[in-house]
Amino acid sequence: MNTPAVDKAPAWLGEFVLLAAVWGGSFVLMRLGAADFGALPTAFVRVLIASATLLPVLLWRGQGPALRQHYKPIFVVGLLNSGVPFACFAYALLSITSGLSSILNATTPLWGALIAWWWLKDRPNSSRILGLVIGFAGVALLASGKANFKPQADGTNSGLAVLACLLATLCYGLAGSFTKRFLTGVPPMATATGSQIGATLGLALPALWLWPAHTPPTRAWLAVAAAGVLCTALAYVLYFRLIAHAGPAKALAVTFLIPVFALVLGAVFLGEQFTPWTVVCGAIIVCGTALATGLLGIRGLRR
């Protein structure tokens, strides 16, 4: 008797899930670090450690000349893709949960599609425009229930935290178009390493100015170090491997899985709670993003 054939899982699936887990965990680690370091020092230490981890690999691969040749645009990408976003998320995590931050992070492809439309004249079809509308509507619904611009007694402000997350994802979107415009053909390892060095240089002075008066505890150091090594250096390697093995579209889809890990890890390690409203709004954002990026399409609206 013939047995039905069972499709094998793609070889890159394990790396895809691992990358989502690593990036989902970054929100938990950043929240742990920011509580003692503060926002800017947390972002600075993270990119500094990532730079120190990636630079020997870059030199070992002999890609130092590529970095020297393109260092100016690569450093700009570093500020847009790491420096400003990491600082914004570290600031936001002082006021809102890691799960909520990760859901807002899922708007990155929305900004990317909108900026590519404006800057690169990459006009989306009707299905993708509908996705943009749905995605940003989900953000508005989520923010309406979570954003309160009145400062709390402990100095936190959830409204500003949500805006900081959206500024971070806007920077990610800008970085994507900037990279496509100015860094096409540059070796990915040179871009990854140089961007972390650029972010380190950009954050150094403000981070040292705002360095905490008291030495952060070991737990905070370990959290930020793990964010630098695992969630930045290792994550870049996984991400570029995923692009090579599965293609950019499937690599981009990792954004949709990150909130799942962030919500679970936040609940387990930080005791965070999430409401059904958060899950519903997150699902709306993810669906809108899938449409906006072309990963999903509606028949009849693809023109």
Image: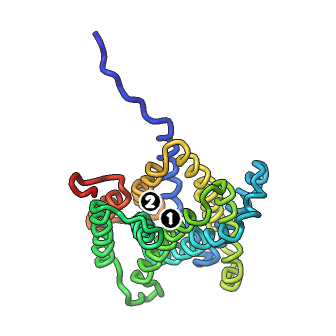
In this image, 280 relative to 264: left or right?
Answer: left
In this image, 18 relative to 97: left or right?
Answer: right
Q: Are marks 2 and 1 in contact (CB under 8 Å)?
A: yes
Question: Foreground residue, 9 or 222?
Answer: 9
Which type of secondary structure does the marked residue at label 2 adopt? helix
Q: CA distance from mark 2 to mark 1?
A: 7 Å
Mark 1 neighbour density, 10 Å: few (under 14) some (14–19) many (20 or more): many
Q: Residue furthest left?
A: 300
Q: Amino acid at mark 1?
A: Phe
**Which tag, 2 or 1, sits closer to the chain's start?**
1
In the image, what residue occupies the spot 53% across and 42% down? 245
- Residue 292 is drawn in which quadrant? bottom left
The residue where tag 2 is placed is 262
The residue where tag 1 is placed is 27
- Residue 44 is drawn in which quadrant? bottom right
Instruction: Answer yes or no: is residue 282 visible.
Output: no
Which type of secondary structure does the marked residue at label 1 adopt? helix
